[in-house]
Image (spheres, rainbow, N blue to C red):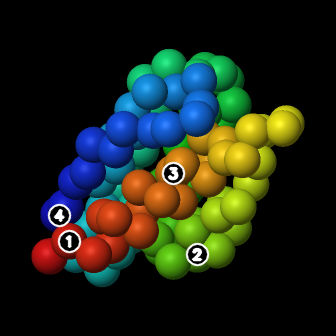
């Protein structure tokens, strides 16, 4: 198992915690701050998914005029987590 606590930038959420198994399957995701309902939905949807699949789907999503979003920040956290041994 591997885990990351990722400090977000440019979003209402402040921190994302992600745990994945050794096969890069997401086991748990939680956000600190942000829109609770939307983020709970994202957490449930990505649980059990492969890291690469989630990155492909979420990377580049913007929140209004902001250059990033909570889903985009999750994709960045997953990129960092994937690189860990």
Q: Are marks 2 and 4 in contact (CB under 8 Å)?
A: no
In-image side of 47 versus 84 (left or right): right
Give me the residue at 45% from left, 38% from top: 8
* Mark 4 or 1, closer to the camera: 1
Front-lying residue, 78 or 63 = 63
* Mark 3–mark 2 distance (CA, rounded to whole Å): 12 Å
Q: Nearer the viewer, residue 13 or 52?
A: 13
Q: Which residue is mark 2?
A: 53
- Image quarter of the N terminus: bottom left
Q: Which residue is at the front of the view, 40 or 66?
A: 66
- Residue beneath disc 4: 1
Query: At x 27% / y 43%, what residue is drawn?
Result: 5
As measured in the structure, the alpha-carbon distance from the residue carrying label 2 to the one carrying label 4 is 18 Å
Q: Quadrant of the C terminus?
A: bottom left
Q: In the rendered image, which residue does mark 3 sit on? A: 74
Q: Which of pointers 3 and 2 lies earlier in the amino acid sequence?
A: 2
Q: Which mark sits nearer the N-terminus, 1 or 2?
A: 2
Q: Image height check: is 13 above or below 52?
A: above
Of the two numbered discs 2 and 4 on the same chain, state the one appearing first in sequence: 4
């Amino acid at each position: 198992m591997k885990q990351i606590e990722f400090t977000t930038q440019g979003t209402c959420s402040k921190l994302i915690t992600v745990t994945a198994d050794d096969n890069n399957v997401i086991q748990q995701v939680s956000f600190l701050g942000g829109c609770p309902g939307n983020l709970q939905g994202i957490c449930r949807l990505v649980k059990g998914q492969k890291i690469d699949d989630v990155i492909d789907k979420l990377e580049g999503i913007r929140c209004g005029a902001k250059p990033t979003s909570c889903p985009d920040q999750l994709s960045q956290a997953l990129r960092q987590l994937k690189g860990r041994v």
